[in-house]
Image: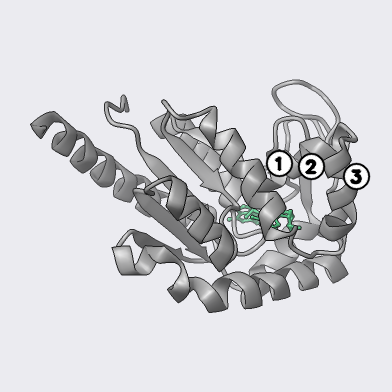
């Protein structure tokens, strides 16, 4: 689908709810640029940047990175995408981050994934990731063509350090208290741009998200042509 107007979207949801999986489908279908806060942090850790080294222990312990660090990092990456439509995955996660984003950009839609925590715990222990691209696989759900290797580059897949059962429990707790419990204070529900999708299987949720985005993007484009 070719877009005329710039479209800015956010995808939210608990750890392991399928934000990365759904983002890959949205990027492929609608051509938005995908920016994942977790992928950016892991790229910094991998490249052993000063920021990466400082943030690694936070991430490995399942805690959120401080708001000021995260907001500065994401807003500076977004500035490079000023002329593009984008999809932000994993940011914002706190009221302070949502306010920082709101000051800089008006977001057209926020997709919120609701997946039960029990389903998530099973998924994350069988996830394999290609760190340079952020592509994710799952032993049961979407296995790589060759076990242990990325489909596109043939490079090795790894298990994330924060996918141990104990850290997953801590990440879910952080999500509950710092994101989910505060969602009404984020500027999205009041602006009428928050849309939730619930379920236990991405393949069942995806057609609803796809239809929703098709109608949302057509209406944004029509409004643009009317100007
Ligand atoms: P991340 O990297 O943003 P999380 O914890 O928010 O990490 P995560 O783990 O990346 O989210 P996801 O992207 O929501 O999960 O899910 P996914 O990878 O697509 O799917 C999970 C697994 O399930 C995969 O193996 C996938 O194949 C499989 N799967 C998908 N659908 C199905 C299905 O229907 N069935 C089955 N069986 N499997 C399925 O953040 C990491 C850390 O970085 C810091 C924090 O420390 C955070 O913990 N951080 C931030 N800190 C502060 N502020 C921020 N904004 C931050 N952003 C990141
Ligand atoms: Mg992810």
Residue 70, x across and y down, in percent: 68, 51
Query: Circle 3 sits on which residue?
Result: 53
User: Circle 2 is placed at which residue position?
Assistant: 42
Q: Is mark 1 within 8 Å of ligand 1?
A: yes
The one nearer the camera, 68 or 214, is 68
Which dot, 2 or 3, sits closer to the camera?
3
CA neighbours of label 3 inside 10 A, class few (<14), some (14 to 19), many (20+): some
Task: Looking at the picture, tell me which residue is in the foreground, 19 or 222.
Answer: 222
Disc 3/disc 1 C-alpha distance (Å): 15 Å
In the picture, residue 225 is in which quadrant?
top left
Alpha carbon separation for disc pair 2 and 1: 5 Å
Residue that numbered label 1 is attached to: 39
Say above or below: 199 vs 108.
Answer: below
Is residue 105 something that shows in the picture? yes
Q: Classify residue 115 as left or right of residue 105.
A: right
Q: Is residue 202 shown left or right of residue 52? A: left
Secondary structure under tag 2 reads helix
């Amino acid at each position: 689908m070719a877009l005329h107007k710039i479209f800015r979207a956010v995808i939210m949801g608990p750890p392991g709810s399928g934000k990365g999986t759904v983002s890959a489908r949205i990027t492929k279908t609608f051509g938005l640029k995908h920016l994942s806060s977790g992928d950016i942090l892991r790229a910094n850790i991998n490249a052993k940047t000063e920021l990466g080294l400082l943030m690694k222990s936070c991430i490995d312990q399942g805690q959120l990175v401080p708001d000021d660090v995260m907001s500065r990092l994401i807003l500076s990456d977004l500035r490079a995408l000023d002329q593009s439509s984008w999809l932000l995955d994993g940011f914002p996660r706190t009221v302070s981050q949502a306010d920082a984003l709101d000051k800089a950009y008006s977001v057209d839609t926020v997709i919120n994934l609701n997946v039960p925590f029990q389903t998530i715990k099973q998924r994350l222990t069988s996830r394999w990731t290609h760190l340079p691209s952020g592509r994710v696989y799952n032993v049961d759900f979407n296995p790589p063509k060759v076990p242990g290797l990325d489909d596109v580059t043939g490079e090795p897949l790894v298990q994330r350090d924060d996918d141990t059962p104990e850290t997953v429990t801590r990440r879910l707790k952080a999500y509950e208290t710092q994101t989910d419990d505060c969602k009404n204070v984020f500027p999205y529900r009041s602006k009428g741009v928050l849309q939730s999708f619930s379920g236990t299987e991405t393949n069942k949720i995806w057609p609803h998200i796809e239809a929703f985005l098709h109608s949302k993007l057509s209406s944004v484009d029509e409004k643009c042509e009317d100007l």
